[in-house]
Amino acid sequence: MFLAKTPAVIRLLMPHYLWKFPDSNRKIYLTFDDGPVPGVTPRVLEILRTYAAKATFFCVGDNVRKHPDIFRQVTDDGHAVGNHTYHHLNGWKTSDKDYLSDVEMCRSVLPSRLFRPPYGRVSRSQASVLRRNYHIVMWDVLSGDYSKDISPEQCLSNITNNAGPGSIIVMHDSLKAERNLLFALPRMLEHYASAGFHFEVIDEQKLRSHSL
């Protein structure tokens, strides 16, 4: 079970995380978690090229180590990248010492000041330390593409019914999400492109311009 739209009360209770941008213009921030993964990530990149869309990829450090050529393709295509821990750890189930060490291990193969906790689960004490060096990026729209309990059509509607100007959308370039992802992604891009939206990266300049 998951919420496709992050409730406003959660965003208010955790103001030090980035949930969405306060944009009034037609910009959306598409993000992908868990890659790079052979087969899936290159297909995602191909679709993004078709629509001239840019995205931010929160990568698992061990996947970067195993697939450096795919990771290089992500950056060569002009997409932004962020830290998603080295071993995809759940912060609620990991000691602060081990969790923070894993984040820094990821940083050794992926130098970025953007960080997204796997599962969105990070303790207050972990986040307090991480915020000294990272921008913690969450989301306001969750596609649910990883869930075997929803159809590709539902995955698409989770996005199109909830995302608007300034939204940060989460999808997954993973084998688990592949079926829903490859159905929803091009249709979602077409939907918003036809409405005049642009898909942009999350980067340091963007964060500074909004004092985040």
Image (cartoon, rainbow, N blue to C red):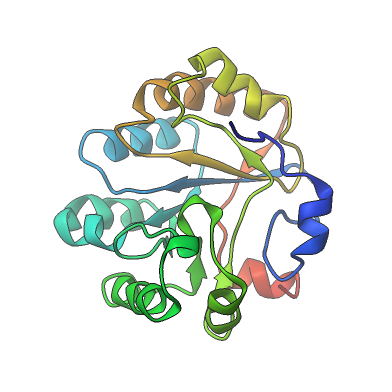
Which residue: 64% across, 29% down? 159
Which residue: 77% across, 67% down? 15
- Image position of 61 (left or right of 152): left
Q: Is residue 152 above or below residue 28?
A: above
> Where residue 118 appears, x then y in whole percent?
45, 55
Report the number of discs: 0
Q: Is residue 4 above or below residue 205?
A: above
Which residue: 77% across, 56% down? 11
Position of the N terminus by quadrant: top right
Of 114 and 144, the residue lying toward us:
144
- Image position of 149 (left or right of 164): left
Of 61 and 195, the residue lying toward us:
61
Position of the C terminus by quadrant: bottom right
> Where residue 127 appears, x then y in whole percent?
58, 74
User: Is any part of residue 26 visible from this angle?
Assistant: yes
Which residue: 53% across, 79% down? 130
> Where residue 150 appears, x then y in whole percent?
52, 18
Quadrant hosting residue 59: bottom left
Q: Is residue 42 above or below residue 11?
A: above
Quadrant hosting residue 64: bottom left
User: Is any part of residue 23 visible from this angle?
Assistant: no
